[in-house]
Amino acid sequence: MKNRILYKADEVRLAYALLTPALLFLAVFMFYPIIYVFLMAFFRTNKLGQLKDWVGLKNFIKMMSQKEFWAVALRSLSWTVIAVTVKTVLGMTIALCLNQKFRGRKIMRMLFIIPWASSVPISAMLWKWVYDSEFGLLNQTLRNLGITQSPPVWLGLPGWSFVSTIWVDIWIGIPFMALVFLAGIQSVSQDLYDSAYVDGVNSWEKFTKITLPSIKQILFIATLLSSLWTFNDFNTIYILTKGGPAGKTHILITSIYTNGFEWLKFSNAAVMAVFTFVILLSFSLFYARQFFGKGDESL
Amino acid sequence: MKRIVLSLFALLALTGMLFITGCKKKEAEKSSVTVFWALYDGLTEDYRMDLQNAFMAEYPDVQLDIVPVPWDQLYDKLTTSIAGGNPPELSIIGTRWALELLDMDAIVPIEDYVSDTTLNNIFDGTKEAVINGKLWGLPVAAGARILTVNNSLTNVVPKTMEEMKAEAQRIVKDTDSYGIIMPGKKHTELTDFAYYLYAAGGDFFEMNADGSYGKCIVNNAAGVKALEFMVSLAKEGLVPDGYLSQSRMEAHPVFYSGDAGYVMIGAWVKSAMEQAGSDFKATYAQIPGFAGHPSTPLVITDSIAMFKDADSLDAAGKFIDFFYQDKWKAKFDELIGFPPVTKSAAKLPQFQNDLYKALNEAAGGAKPWPLMNGFAETTDIIWDAVSFALLGEKTPQQALDDAAKKVDEMRADL
């Protein structure tokens, strides 16, 4: 008995010893920056981001009394909702198509992964060239097909630039959704579909009554991850428009960067970062509750 | 079990010690100098590599790393590295950033690390980064902006902005080309608004009696005239169709390709045109004022500054002395097209042509950026106002009124 206890104590010590480097790494590179950002939000900071005077909620009150802040927050929300909805719908459609048996299915599956496999900055640069108003592929195609001789300035007009940047985020994100959904669909038992076939159930009902409920967990994880990534998609906007024209494509994450590293207003940036953190955490918890209900232990 | 745990900790400790001693040994052997190197138009990768290799051949005890950074990312990269406590030894900076960097206590007086030979060879007039009696950055490129005329489309060298617009209208009407280049997307600073603002006799801030900057006055008659003029150029189709999505880097190649009559540009125009393979003759002239106003071009000075928290400032000083020799600095000036800042290079035959004649003339009546804190945010606010007016969402007066108010509020809060 004594030996067993000693053995267990040794195991615990070993576990801690093995965990220590990883915990140290997390503490230095994750927890410390997060805590420091929270502190900056409650302090006046200098241009190097060092804490100077405690100001309590003053930074929050000042930031939240600015209508530009709320415009950016609202834009972040609409950017995320639109992008995630489209990615989910298109991703599911593609997954259903790729689940059908047809010639060249393997190649199609491989091709679909390319946007996801490419790095985001490269994809964004590529789309920047596509959208170029003078020499871009898109406008040249529109001109050559005779659709219009004065195509839009995709990245220069507020409405179009918002749509154009969202589309790039969607284009990059669809393969992830499609592949995750496809993996989920393939795990659904064929017996359920066979029984449904015998009962004369149509395709739509099969999808809504069998497929969707069966991949509920995967759908939740994929849309949650996609929402978090989309809300924080800095690269796409920064490379395509830098938040312009006239700040009309700024979302919270790009505003945080501008305030912090261009204007050196680290307190303002920290307030936005804390706001973003709270919003995303609340959303994740609320979403999990709504999706699985209170009693579900599966998460 | 205990032995395993102890062995694990011993291994970790040994790795850590090896890492630390390894680093120290390396440091003891070589000083490391990092330079953030602005990618000026015309500057080549070959030149950067040659300079780096030549310096290390002469100073084998110094590891030099010249890091190329695009201009519009330089400020962000620099401030990020300073905020992260890991600045380079040296960086090219817009001289107008010097106050901000000084306010951050990030730079040191460069004159303390550079030889007198180098300092005495630089024209005093270009040493713009003198603050509180100390020199915080050596001028690396200084030049007034000029007008370049595409002679395949026009031979008219306009005396006023109004004349330039009239000729731009003719070019658009008679040819399949654009009248004038006007970037509508912000590129680092407010350059393309400043051309028109200064041409209308305007300024960004009123000057107080003690020489400090007062209220923002971009919304006065001169500012509004400048912005109304820009809006009219766009509305009348005298600028490239996609101007709103073009920064300077995207807009100027349209001129290099010969598709526009005029461009207001820096001294790099000649070398950039050569590199782009431009096949038309160009005339270098002065940026005109509006009728009744003298030509007042923007003059821009860039400097090279030394950073306090970097490790090898003495070695960085050696690099500056090396770089400012004619062999390297004159070649640098020639590539980027700026007039030399050193007395010895100014006498060289390659700096005696028509371009440098125009640049020297422009320098006479030129006006610089305001040297002030909060300039990065000021330029963002004013450029947003320019965008609102170009997009037609606000009148020039409304847009500039809002901007001036916002700039004053922001500065009061600094």
Image (cartoon, rainbow, N blue to C red):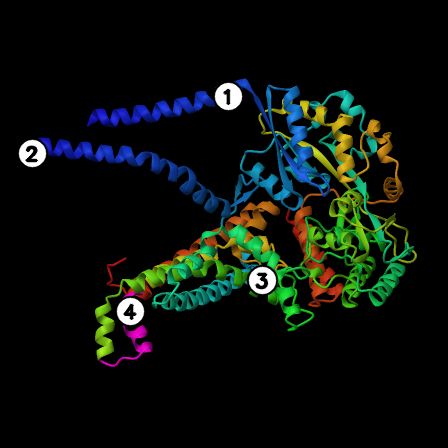
Badge 3 and badge 1 both on one subunit: no
Residue at numbered disc 4? A213
- Quarter of the image for the N terminus of chain B: give it: top left
- Asked if the magenta segment contains residue A251, the reply would be no
Residue at numbered disc 3? A67
Q: Nearer the viewer, residue B310 or A139?
A: A139
Label 4 resides on the chain identified as: A
Magenta stretch, residue numbers = A199-216
Q: CA distance from mark 4 to mark 3?
A: 42 Å
Q: Residue B26's mark?
A: 1
SS at circle 1 = helix
Snapshot quadrant of residue A213? bottom left
Badge 1 and badge 4 both on one subunit: no
Chief secondary structure of the magenta portion: helix
Indicate which disc, 2 or 4, sits on the residue closer to the N terminus.
2
**Camera-side mark, 2 or 4:** 4
Badge 2 and badge 3 both on one subunit: yes
Name the amino acid, label 4: Pro
Q: Nearer the viewer, residue A129 or A109?
A: A109
- Mark 4 nearby-residue class (10 Å; few <14, some 14–19, many ≥20): few
Label 2 resides on the chain identified as: A
Q: Residue at x 56, y 47 (%)?
A: A260
Indicate which disc, 4 or 3, sits on the residue closer to the N terminus.
3
Residue B366 placement (x, y as % from top left): 85, 44
